[in-house]
Amino acid sequence: MKPGFSRTWRSLLSWPRPAGGRRFSACHFCDTLHEANPVAEGTAANCTRCGAVLYQNRPASLARASAFSLAALLLMVLVHVFPFLTMDAASLRRNLTLIGAASALIHEDAPLLGASILLFTVVAPLMLAGGMIYVCMPLMAGRAAPGAFIVAKWMYRSEPWNMVEVFLLGVLVSLLKLAKVADVHFGVGFWAFGGVMIFMAAAVAGIDREELWDRLEVARS
Amino acid sequence: MVSPVADGRCRRCGSTLHLRKPGSIQNTVALMAAAAALYIPSHVLPVMTVVEIGVVTHNTIIGGMMTFWRTGAYPIAIVIFTASILIPLLKIVALTWLCLAATGRVHPSPAALGRLYLLTELLGRWSMVDIFVVGILVSLVQLGNYMTITPGPGALAFAGVVMLTMFAAMSFDPRLLWDRLDELPGAPNPSTE
């Protein structure tokens, strides 16, 4: 850190950091140790050896993460109320919902497949969006919610298992498969899930992991 | 500065700390071998069974793709080919290469191999699309005597391939590649920089 770096200038550049000396950041990819200097809003610090992003300073991070995850949560309600697809065939009308797809597999003797659909399209997105809002909203008032550290840990653990976009591709492929045998229409659920996909991506990209944990630690102390 | 790893646990979130993922290579190889073993059954066994007016047909993933190709739906055939045939194979090949490089049997070029690792982590999830299609079709096509679709054993095998390769990619530690590079003669010593 440059010696002439004033306190006010630094606070303009970055989020509040926990007290205590110089801060370091090890690249999660190649393990090179860096001094973790604050970066200007909207920019990122990259590893000097492998180029991976060390941490980013996102503008309006807490507000964006909370707002986008709230939007995703609200749309999740619509996803469960309205069907993704409606199919008319042989004088029957069938609707597709996430719970319906999972329970159909469970009833047809494929409980593991049904459970994996439930996990990847219902549980993981709920953990991610719900966890994000639970952690970030109280942080806007400078407070850490009860159990926020555990919630934040499990929220980031659920991230790779969140497969909203993959399910949407699956709906499109199924639509093409069924187009020959039946009359198939998109429902509100499909578009709402598309919205969930976009808002979840925006919420996760809205706040840097390092910043979230720093703010939690500052709020706790 | 004392390394926080000496504490054993993260002071913030309580996770166990380690310098390198423990047993990274063994775990990756074991999970990958299991995935490779399931790969053949997942494409030979039917992923779903269609009963149309009493006529039973067993559908495999490759069969479904061929149907799209024959009917001229080339983009969707290419999507299915990439997601369900190419990506799992590429992941197994890529992880084998990464493990060989991390154990010093192949020259470690961490910059290029690192990109390969990121790519396998990024693409792996898209293979799940076939499982979702099976779930969607089984749920929608329950039309009594006219047409019903039930899931087949191939679907479970394929879901196994996807999840095992995802776990294998997660248990691989890309830092091992950089450790190898540091050991090579003529490598810049990071501690003097």
Image: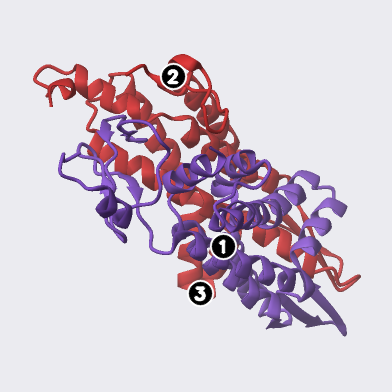
Circles 2 and 3, Cβ within 8 Å, touching? The answer is no
Which chain did the renderer colour purple? Answer: A
Is label 3 in a helix, a strand or a loop? Answer: loop
With A99 as the anchor, is A145 left or right in this view? left
Tell me the CA gap for discs 2 and 1.
Answer: 32 Å
Circles 1 and 3, Cβ within 8 Å, touching? The answer is no
Counting from the top left corner in percent of width and height, residue A165 is at 55, 63
Amino acid found under the numbered disc labelled 2: Val
Residue at 44 percent of width and 41 percent of height = B91
With A59 as the anchor, is B73 left or right in this view? right
Question: Could you tell me which chain the residue with mark 3 belongs to?
Answer: B
Q: Nearer the viewer, residue B147 or A21?
A: A21
With A82 as the anchor, is A206 left or right in this view? left
Q: Is residue A203 above or below residue A79?
A: above
Which mark, residue A66?
A: 1
Q: Colour of chain B?
A: red
Residue at image mark 2: B5
Residue at image mark 3: B73
Q: Is residue B125 above or below residue B94?
A: below
Residue at 60 percent of width and 39 percent of height = A149
Same chain shared by disc 1 and disc 3: no
Considering the image in quadrants, where does the N terminus of chain A appear? top left
Residue with the most extreme top position:
B6
Tell me the CA gap for discs 1 and 3.
Answer: 41 Å
Residue at 24 percent of width and 44 percent of height = A51
Tell me the CA gap for discs 2 and 3.
Answer: 54 Å
Question: Could you tell me which chain the residue with mark 1 belongs to?
Answer: A
Confirm whether residue B152 shows in the render. Answer: no
